[in-house]
Image (tube, rainbow, N blue to C red):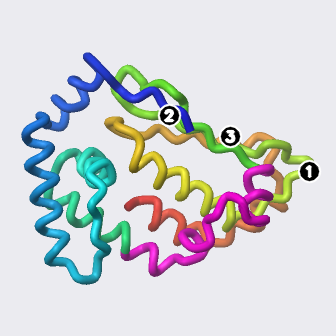
Amino acid sequence: MTLVLPAGDMLKKIQSDLNLTEGREQEDLSKLKEWLVLQPHLPKIDDDRLLAGFLYGSKNSMERCKKVIDLHYTVRGAAPEFFKNRDPKNADMQSCLESVYIVPMPKLTAEGARVTIHGLQDPAKSQFNASECMKLVFLTGDIRLREDICSGDVLIYDLSGSSLSHLAQLTLPLVRKFMICGQV
């Protein structure tokens, strides 16, 4: 995934909107690492880029960031159908990659948000598996959490060509779990 990361004025705008300076970001990352040591139920995270992603996603609110990190790892245990066996080379994921597209736009909006478009590649011959495709959505989000800097997300779902057979797979429990996990 090749994303154009913000630089210059756009990066300054995003950092200003978050009341974030280079020194403040390093200080907040250190505080998060200290907090993580005291959380035995959470994994050890040494990846500053990942922690910075949580900070940016939490609008630089330390308390909100702690809650998001806690929920991020908690939902992974509660929804293994979305977070286990995510090897893009396995047959189920390959089938999903052939049936849907998830395309984060390379450039940010004027407000600093990243637009991502989701849709069916070829609805007529789609081997659509809702659970696997939701897994791919979360995998894409996890990659962006580590690699992207933006002030928010705009998600576009292109449902043209969708049929009742596609919708039949979107059971209420599956969609509910997807929505809960997606809010973290």
Task: Name which residue lies at 75% across and 67% down.
Answer: 169
User: On the rendered image, what quadrant is the C terminus found in?
Assistant: bottom left
**How far is mark 1 from mark 3, CA to CA?**
17 Å
Left or right, 93 with respect to 80, comes to: right
Q: Is residue 142 magenta?
A: no
Q: 177 above or below 30?
A: below
Q: Which mark is residue 125?
A: 1
Task: Name which residue lies at 60% across and 63% down.
Answer: 135
User: On the rendered image, what quadrant is the N terminus found in?
Assistant: top right
Task: Name which residue lies at 85% across and 47% down.
Answer: 123
Query: Residue 25's spot in the image, x, y percent?
Result: 14, 43
Identified by mark 1, the residue type is: Lys
Identified by mark 3, the residue type is: Asp
In primary-sequence order, the first of circles 1 and 3 is 1
Which residue is identified by label 3? 158
Task: Identify the magenta region.
Answer: 74-99
Q: Nearer the viewer, mark 3 or mark 2?
A: 2
Q: Secondary structure at mark 1?
A: helix
In primary-sequence order, the first of circles 1 and 2 is 2
